[in-house]
Each structure stands twice: as structure tokens, then as C-alpha cells.
Image (tube, rainbow, N blue to C red):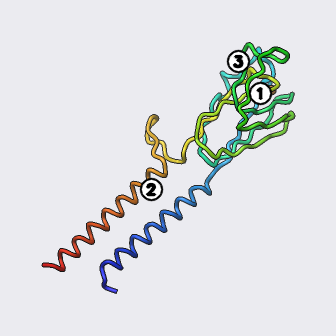
Amino acid sequence: MTNPYARIGAVTGIFFLGLMTLLSVENAYAKTVHIDIPFGDHDKNLRTVIELYSQINHNVDVGDTISWLNDDQVSHTVTSGKGAGLSGFVGSSEQGKPDGYFSSGVIESGKSWSFTFTKTGFFTYFCEIHPWIERSITVNEPGIDITQEFRLTYTALLTIVIVLVASIATILLIKRVKNKKS
Ligand SMILES: [Cu+2]
């Protein structure tokens, strides 16, 4: 098999197959992130204190699952949408506004609830029973953080590698054709 076209074609084919495999394996690494609903969360007066010690926003990748564990002594909900802020309380007109993306229903003390994020975005959530509890999830495309501002997604990385492989293959092909002519 000395046909240069066939050889380059085979090499390129193998590269693509390898990349596809890498990409599908990457999806298999989707992880579960555990978030604690802290003890005392139901007490509106503790919100500022709790926010000092527990993370308000969590960053995850598309495909990741978040599991919320209710560590408080009362029931809570994890409901996407906008909470009522510190002025919101049960019985008032300010109850928070669910947006329908996810809703746990009642999570009893000691129980947990999970949700898998299948799209990128910034999602705020609150508790329907205690609408002053307001937190968020940032869902990113899977990738590597190069700097704090710059994130190289696996899709971008894959594109770069494909362009590189295609360029090298083309250069080799041109060289072969030139060599044959001279
Ligand atoms: Cu609650």
C-alpha cells in the first residue's frame, strides 16, 4: 500500500476516530456535585451569617448532576427562579417566582434531591418555603480553565486539533504530489 492518498486518508481517519472516542469518554466523566442545605437555613435572620460560610454560587459542567442534601432541621425546596429577597417571608405577598426549569418539591430534613444540568447558563434558585434563601448554579461547557477569564472548551480544543491534523495532512499531500512531479 504505497498510495500516499490512501495512507494519509487512513491516518486522518484514525485521528478522527480517536478524537470522537475522546469526546465521548469526556461525557462519561460527568460528575455529581454535592451541595449542602446548611443547618439553620430556615432562619431568615441567619441568612447573612450562612452566606458568609457557605457558597452562594456553584460552577458545574453540562452533564453534571447536583445533589442537594438538606442538613437543616426543617423541610426546604430547591426551586429555579427568583426568590423574594430578604423582605420575603411566608404569608407575605412576596413568595418568589419559579421559572419552571427545576423544582424539587419538599425535601425533608436529612433527605436529598438531585438534578442533572443539560444546558449551559446561569440559574438562580430559591426555597419556596423560605423564599429569602437565594442561590445560583453556573453551568459551563466542559473544558479547561486556562486563566480566570479564559476557558478553553473541549469543543474548541477539538476544533483546533482537527484543523491542525487537516493542515498537516494537506501539507504532506502537496509535498508528495510535488515530489512525484520533479
Ligand atoms: Cu426552605
Q: Amino acid at mark 3?
A: Gly
Q: Is residue 181 left or right of residue 167?
A: left
Query: Residue at label 3?
Result: 85
Give ligand 1's quarter of the image: top right
Q: Are marks 1 and 3 in contact (CB under 8 Å)?
A: no
Residue position marked by numbered label 2 in the rendering: 158
Gap between marks 2 and 3, in whole Å?
A: 42 Å
Label 1 residue SS: loop
76 to the left or right of 49 = right
Q: Amino acid at mark 1?
A: Cys
Q: Is residue 10 above or below residue 33?
A: below
Q: Is residue 94 above or below residue 57?
A: above
Taking depth in this image into account, of 126 and 66 the one nearest to the observer is 126
The relative height of residue 127 versus residue 60 in the rendered view (above or below) is above
Question: How far across and how far down the image is residue 14, in percent?
Answer: 44, 71
Q: Residue furthest bottom?
A: 1
Give the x, y percent position of residue 29. Answer: 61, 54
Q: Is residue 123 left or right of residue 70?
A: left
Query: Decide: marks 2, 1 in contact (CB < 8 A)?
Result: no
Label 1 C-beta lies within 8 Å of the nearest ligand 1 atom: yes
